């Protein structure tokens, strides 16, 4: 499948013009931190490109389904993703009067060939939508720390850990003051 590239038509270089674009994008896989999201079907995207006078504003959505592993039980599961696509591209030679060079650095320049590669914008929109910790279910029980059995399938039969008094005391934020004498 081809990369998601938009060829900007000549009419969009006129102020206040806009046009809709849509397509599908085969993202393959996206690795964010320790998590890998695999996309079995292409994502669908739809954007509007508007000339704001010296720049092109790209806004729209990208939607699809991803598969990853639960952070607690390590079982694969699927989740729906929907991200907001945003981009602002300065048209070369059309910079606004009085615009400072450091302001131009905040935005991307439209490539000379007039083609926008949508992949970075689509990826960024999906990354923002990803959960901080992917869970198959909010109530996922995870794995037994002793035998590794998935506790969502039922109890494992391991002996519960004995109460560790030192560990419980160390959780107290004032534990470091335990042996301190306050007498002068």
Image (cartoon, rainbow, N blue to C red):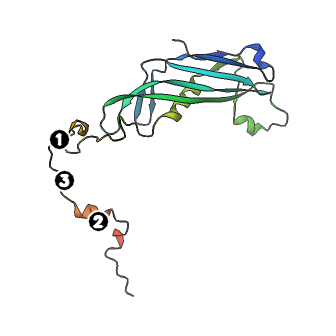
Earlier along the polypeptide chain: callout 2 or callout 3? 3
Task: Choose between 47 and 93: the one closer to the eye.
Answer: 47
Residue beneath disc 1? 156
- In this figure, which residue is indicated by the disc labeled 2? 169
Please provide percent x and percent y for residue 1. 51, 11
Q: How far apart are marks 2 and 1 (CA)?
A: 28 Å
Could you tell me how far apart the alpha carbons at marks 2 and 3 are, in whole angstroms?
Answer: 16 Å
Quadrant of the frame with the C terminus:
bottom left
Element on which disc 3 rests: loop
Q: Mark 3 near mark 1, Cβ–Cβ under 8 Å?
A: no
| Residue 161 badge | 3
SS for callout 2: helix
- Sort mark 1 into few (<14), some (14-19) or many (20+) by Cα contacts within 10 Å: some
* In this rendering, position of residue 127 left or right of residue 20: left
* Snapshot quadrant of residue 7: top right
Q: Which of 62 and 109 is in front in this view?
A: 62
Q: Distance between the residues labelled 3 and 1?
A: 13 Å
- Frontmost of labels 2 and 1 is 1
């Amino acid at each position: 499948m081809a990369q998601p590239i938009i060829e900007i038509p000549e009419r969009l270089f006129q102020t206040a013009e806009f046009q809709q674009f849509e397509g599908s994008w085969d993202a393959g896989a996206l690795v964010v931190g320790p998590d890998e999201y695999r996309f079995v079907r292409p994502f669908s995207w739809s954007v509007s490109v508007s000339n704001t006078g010296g720049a092109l504003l790209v806004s729209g959505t990208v939607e699809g389904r991803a598969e990853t592993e639960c952070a607690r039980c390590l079982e694969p599961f699927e989740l729906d993703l929907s991200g907001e696509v945003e981009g602002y591209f300065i048209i070369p030679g059309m910079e606004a009067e009085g615009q400072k060079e450091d302001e131009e650095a905040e935005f991307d320049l439209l490539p000379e060939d007039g083609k926008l590669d949508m992949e970075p914008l689509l990826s960024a929109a999906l990354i923002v939508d990803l959960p901080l910790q992917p869970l198959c279910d909010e109530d996922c029980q995870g794995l037994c720390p002793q035998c590794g059995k998935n506790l969502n399938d039922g109890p494992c039969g391991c002996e519960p850990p004995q109460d560790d008094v030192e560990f419980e005391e160390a959780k107290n934020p004032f534990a470091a003051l335990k042996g301190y004498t306050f007498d002068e």
